[in-house]
Image (cartoon, rainbow, N blue to C red):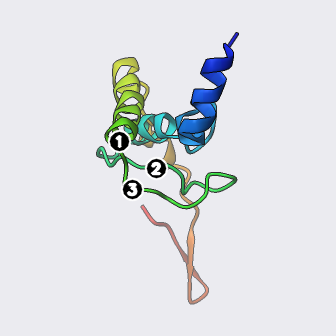
Amino acid sequence: MQTEKQRVVKILKGWQFDRKQHGCLFDRGSADSYYGRPRQPHYGGVGGDSGVRVEQLTAEEVAEYQAGYDYNERCGDKKDWRYWKHCVRPLVVSSVHTHTC
């Protein structure tokens, strides 16, 4: 259970520090790690209520993003791209069906 002080600090910091929010700093860091993307600290820009992508961050915000990235690196949870190779839909080019792979 959060104390009143913890709730106030959370509100003052902003939603980007709320680890339960899709698009928050921790979420974006862990997602970048999961998909094998390089570290590029940011938050938002993933639809829903996340707003526009924000890349100009404070040192504290960068640290929160890095915590998410590092967490996923330690857990070793990575996207298995082998599955997607077999699920690519055919492209339609001038009424001729071709596959992308």
Give the residue displayed 41% in from the left and 32% down from the top.
Answer: 64
Identify residue type, mark 2: Lys
Rendered image quadrant of residue 67: top left
Disc 3 versus disc 1: nearer the observer? 3
Q: Is residue 16 left or right of residue 21?
A: left
Q: Are marks 2 and 3 in contact (CB under 8 Å)?
A: no
The percent position of residue 20, horizontal first and vertical second, equals: 63, 30
Of residues 28 and 63, the one drawn nearer to the viewer in this rendering: 63
- Give the residue displayed 61% in from the left and 41% down from the top: 22
Residue marked by disc 3: 55
Q: What is the three-letter code of the residue carrying label 3?
A: Glu
The foreground one among 100 and 45 is 45
Residue 68: x, y in percent?
Answer: 42, 30
Q: Secondary structure at mark 2?
A: helix
Q: Secondary structure at mark 1?
A: loop
Q: Position of residue 65 (x, y in %)?
A: 40, 37
Q: CA distance from mark 3 to mark 1?
A: 19 Å
Answer with the quarter of the image where residue 39 lies. Answer: top left
Q: Which residue is mark 2?
A: 85
Vertical order, 2 against 35 (above or below): above
Lower sequence index among marks 2 and 3: 3
